[in-house]
């Protein structure tokens, strides 16, 4: 099975609460983003509207690979943005910035692709296991994007005091999987490390302006330059390493309390996770109410097994609790203790009907929807449900998916240009000269009472008999109007013909040239009167008006 092959395959909507204060200084918006990380979206908003760092608060980070909705609050400024991949909807005012406490839950809708029919029976068994046992609340692969893109754990560089390595991994380590201008900027500074006066040609370089300005002032003070990174992003770099230690500690704890036959492995970006497929009622009851700490120098343990598992995770990295600090910047770079539930239970878990997968023929696809508490990973629930067939995409598959999405973006503008215009009769001449006068015959729209706008054949009908007894055939001359000579194939001057088309407003119109070889110019007094023609269904006769604008093809 595969997920996130298309941005619309992964959707998340945030359930929120905040105190509505009409005079509040913070303006609250619902941010709808697609194929953007939360940090990328906030940077775009800050740059577009000239906001200071920290002016935008949010409840949490949302996945880049998909379409997500989340709450943000802007301090003291009214903004509006409606772009294809980033939209804002104003909700109200509040008197305080947003935080994780403002999110109550997240509702996910995930399209799972490349499902084999024989896997559906196993899926039903997995659903029963998840409902009874829950899912281990690990941090999933998207938390460890720095590993995926070759930057490693930057927090470990900071703990060792190697600030140049930390800054180099942040600023000058391009990812082979990244096709954006940001990767080109990182490649430029990788090739021009310590040449801070070099001029980077890519516009994305402005993201690193504060860091580069600090390096130009003091080329060897790498810690000072690192501290110019946005504070939220710095905290996330430390939290990434904490998340890895949490995963390793919980994995060890499950090994201590569950027999080996009740566990099964699952690979992810930072190594291997262990999930349980069974547990004794007593152990399961203990695990349900258990929390495991995100480690910090001041962490304490309420259970000896938790202490043993945490120390084992630290020992793998040759660290102790006291080592989780950056002595030269204790106030700006620090690890914070926090308790995280060990298990999570998806609520309102619903499986959709299987359908043919148009991207992975002849396999199937289905939709999986569920609700999670804030901070839990929907991708981990999907992997647990499909653990018997899940695998991570290879680098080649990731590049192929990226190329497919980019190709779709390029084709979308052309779809409007290539859209077929309304078809016209081949016998009609829609060419027109700018000097020709036109008469437009405008049909009234449907009145909503069963009277429909006449079809195209009705506009070809004429004569005193109206519509009754009409048989399709060549267009007949109007009553009192001079007959038009038949067109000859070898004639130099072909007579003008009536043209019909459908306008942008959906109304059918008929055009008759006033100056044409078949109808010589006549004065208003000599021009024969046109008898009103009743329309089908009792609608009033259409009105004739003269157009002041020439017809253009």
Image: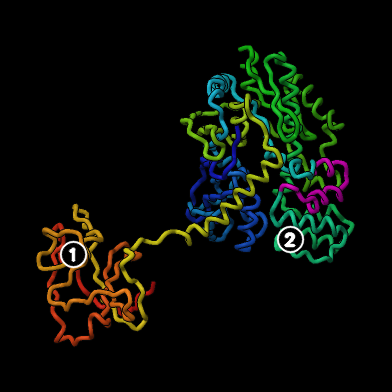
- Residue assigned mark 2: 205
- Mark 1 lies on a secondary structure that is loop
Which secondary structure type mostly characterizes the magenta part of the structure?
helix
In the rendered view, would you say 136 is above or below 112? above
Residue 379 in picture, x, y percent from top left: 61, 34
Q: Give me the residue at 65% from left, 52% from top.
A: 40
Residue 11 in picture, x, y percent from top left: 54, 41
Residue 535 in picture, x, y percent from top left: 16, 62
Question: Real-space Cα distance between discs 1 and 2?
Answer: 67 Å
What is the residue that sits farthest to the right in this orientation? 220
Indicate the quadrant containing the N terminus: top left, top right, bottom left or bottom right.
Answer: top right
Indicate the quadrant containing the C terminus: top left, top right, bottom left or bottom right.
Answer: bottom left
Q: Are marks 1 and 2 in contact (CB under 8 Å)?
A: no
What is the residue that sits farthest to the left in this orientation? 465
Residue 340 visible: no
Residue 461: give its label. Answer: 1
Pick the front one: 500 or 100: 500
Q: Give me the residue at 71% from left, 32% from top.
A: 268
- Mark 2 lies on a secondary structure that is helix
- Residue 170 lies in magenta, yes or no? yes
Residue 360 in picture, x, y percent from top left: 57, 37
Range of the magenta residues? 153-177
Q: Quadrant of residue 236?
A: top right
Pick the front one: 319 or 151: 151
In the rendered view, would you say 16 is above or below 373? below
């Amino acid at each position: 099975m595969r997920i996130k092959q298309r941005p619309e395959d992964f959707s998340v909507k945030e359930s929120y609460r905040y105190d509505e204060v009409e005079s509040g200084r913070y303006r609250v918006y619902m941010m709808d983003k697609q194929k953007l990380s939360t940090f990328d979206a906030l940077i775009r908003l800050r740059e577009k509207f000239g906001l200071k760092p920290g002016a935008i608060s949010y409840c949490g980070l949302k996945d880049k690979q998909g379409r997500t909705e989340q709450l943000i609050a802007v301090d003291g400024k009214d903004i509006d943005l409606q772009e294809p991949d980033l939209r804002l909807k104003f909700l109200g005012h509040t008197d305080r910035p947003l935080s994780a406490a403002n999110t109550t839950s997240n509702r996910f809708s995930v399209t799972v692709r490349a499902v084999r029919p024989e896997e559906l029976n196993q899926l039903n068994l997995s659903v029963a296991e998840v409902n009874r046992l829950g899912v281990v609340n690990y941090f999933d692969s998207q938390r460890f994007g720095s590993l995926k893109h070759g930057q490693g754990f930057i927090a470990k560089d900071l703990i060792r005091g190697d600030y140049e390595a930390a800054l180099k991994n942040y600023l000058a380590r391009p990812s082979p999987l990244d096709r954006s201008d940001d990767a080109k900027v990182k490649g430029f500074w990788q090739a021009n490390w310590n040449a801070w006066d070099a001029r980077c040609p890519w516009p994305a370089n402005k993201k690193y302006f504060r860091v580069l300005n600090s390096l130009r002032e003091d080329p060897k003070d790498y810690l000072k330059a690192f501290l110019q990174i946005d504070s939220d992003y710095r905290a996330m770099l430390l939290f990434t390493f904490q998340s890895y230690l949490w995963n390793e500690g919980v994995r060890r704890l499950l090994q201590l309390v569950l027999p080996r036959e009740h566990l099964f492995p699952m690979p992810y970006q930072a190594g291997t996770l262990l999930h349980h497929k069974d547990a004794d009622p007593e152990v399961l009851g203990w695990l349900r109410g258990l929390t495991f700490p995100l480690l910090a120098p001041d962490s304490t343990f309420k259970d000896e097994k938790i202490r043993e598992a945490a120390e084992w995770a630290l020992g793998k990295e040759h660290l102790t609790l006291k080592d989780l600090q950056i002595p030269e910047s204790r106030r700006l770079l620090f690890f914070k203790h926090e308790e995280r539930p060990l298990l999570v239970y998806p609520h309102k878990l619903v499986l959709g009907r299987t359908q043919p997968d148009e991207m992975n023929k002849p396999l199937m696809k289905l939709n999986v929807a569920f609700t999670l508490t804030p901070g839990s990973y929907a991708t981990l629930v999907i992997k647990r449900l499909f653990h018997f067939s899940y695998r991570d995409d290879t680098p080649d598959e990731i590049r192929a998916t990226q190329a497919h999405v980019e190709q779709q973006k390029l084709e979308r503008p052309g779809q409007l240009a290539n859209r077929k215009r309304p078809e016209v009769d081949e016998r009609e001449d829609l060419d027109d000269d700018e000097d020709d006068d036109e008469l437009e015959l405008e049909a009234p729209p449907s009145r909503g009472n069963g009277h429909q706008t006449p079809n195209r054949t009705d506009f070809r009908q004429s004569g005193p008999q109206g519509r009754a007894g009409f048989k399709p055939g060549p267009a007949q001359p109007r009553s009192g109007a001079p007959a038009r000579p038949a067109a000859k194939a070898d004639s130099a001057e072909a007579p003008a013909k009536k043209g019909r088309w459908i306008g942008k407003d959906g109304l059918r119109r008929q055009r008759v040239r006033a100056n044409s070889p078949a109808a010589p110019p006549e004065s208003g007094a000599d021009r024969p009167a046109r008898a009103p023609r009743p329309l089908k269904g009792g609608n009033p006769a259409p009105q004739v008006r003269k157009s002041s604008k020439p017809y253009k093809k």
